[in-house]
Amino acid sequence: MDIPYIVEERADTGLNNVKLGIWLFLASEVMLFGALFSSYVLLRLIAPEWPLGVDVLNVPLGAVNTAVLIGSSVTMVLAYASLKMDNLDRYKQWMGLTVALALVFMIIKAFEYNHEFEIGNFPWTSTYLAIYFTMTGLHALHIIGGVIVNSYFLGPGAKMWETNKAQFTNRVEAAGLYWHFVDLVWIFLFPVLYLL
Amino acid sequence: MSEDVQAHIRTYMKVGAALAVLTVVTVAVSYLPFGVPLAVTVALIIAATKGSLVVSFFMHLIEEKRGIYATLLLTAFFFIVLLFIPLLGHADKVGEYYTVPNANAPAAESGGH
């Protein structure tokens, strides 16, 4: 049985189900990260002392990672645009770069975590570090999820291009929406945890 | 179709450049001697600007259908509720033990409260 409205739009919503589905998922993600941002504000308000992020974390590394993730968002949207222009080879280049930049982000994050552990900063060391590791750890899990999905669409998943271009383009668009959301979360995490 | 996509690509590049510049601005501003309230305000304004650029152009929200706007409007509402529930709980003094001086009580008994 074919699942309806994966490519064509429903008359009532004006959307295909892929688009509506991924936005609803992202809405639930807003609530997930929203709960953590809310916890952060409360913990910071009631904490007897709260360190400045700049005194604990490596701001230049965090800034570089922000640029890396923004770069990967640009390459992701260019990968989608390449499919719109019917150019699979160009799509693969941009998607490959997107995955590579995500891995660079994770490597830098691993260096940062490793450094924190070396100087004895663990999640149980302070409230600040607890919320820092929780939020960046959850974000890193989202990066890993994105790498898996994007790698699939770069490799075996790309075979769908030969049989159903419109559906494959929709899939990449949905993966892109997720990826930009992960970038969006980091855009807020960086100043909140590193700079304030 | 192709020209339309080309126009989009030019927009993506401009937005990407703007985001890079705003990232530098975020870091630069954090070194200015602002107090915490002003620093938080400035940082959140820049982050919100960057976020709206990502959502509007990379996620194509500016050309999206009403169904998505409705979903996001609900999400924004519940996000604000989520943000304020713990804060209101923190600020809430109802139920906290306190005593009102009782003018009718004998002086010896009211002294302890």
Image: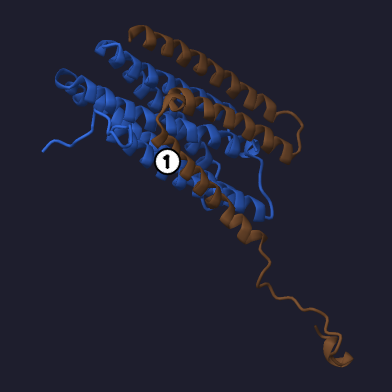
Chain colours: A blue, B brown
Front residue of A116 and B35: B35
Question: In which image quadrant can residue B44 be found?
Answer: top right
Comparing B37 with A84, the one in front is A84
Residue at (50% x, 18% y) in the render: B16
Instruction: Using residue B54 as the reference point, say whether residue A41 is left or right of it.
Output: right
Which residue is disc 1 drawn over?
A: B71
- Residue A49 is situated, as x and y percent measured from the top left of the image, at 68, 51
Rendering coords of residue A17 (x, y %): 28, 36
Q: Residue furthest right?
A: B107
Tell me, yes or no, if residue A14 can be seen here. Answer: yes
Q: Chain of mark 1?
A: B
Residue at point 46% right, 42% down?
A: A30
Query: What amino acid type should be assigned to the residue bearing mark 1?
Result: Thr
Residue at 41%, 28% (x, y): give it: B64
Above or below, B69 against A33 in this view is above
Secondary structure under the numbered disc 1 in the rendered image: helix
Residue B57: x %, y % from top left: 46, 22
Farthest top residue in view: B3
Which residue is the extreme one toward the front?
Answer: A11
**In the rendered image, the vertical position of residue A101 relative to residue A26, given as above or below:** above
- Based on the displayed image, in which of its 4 quarters is residue B25 positioned? top right
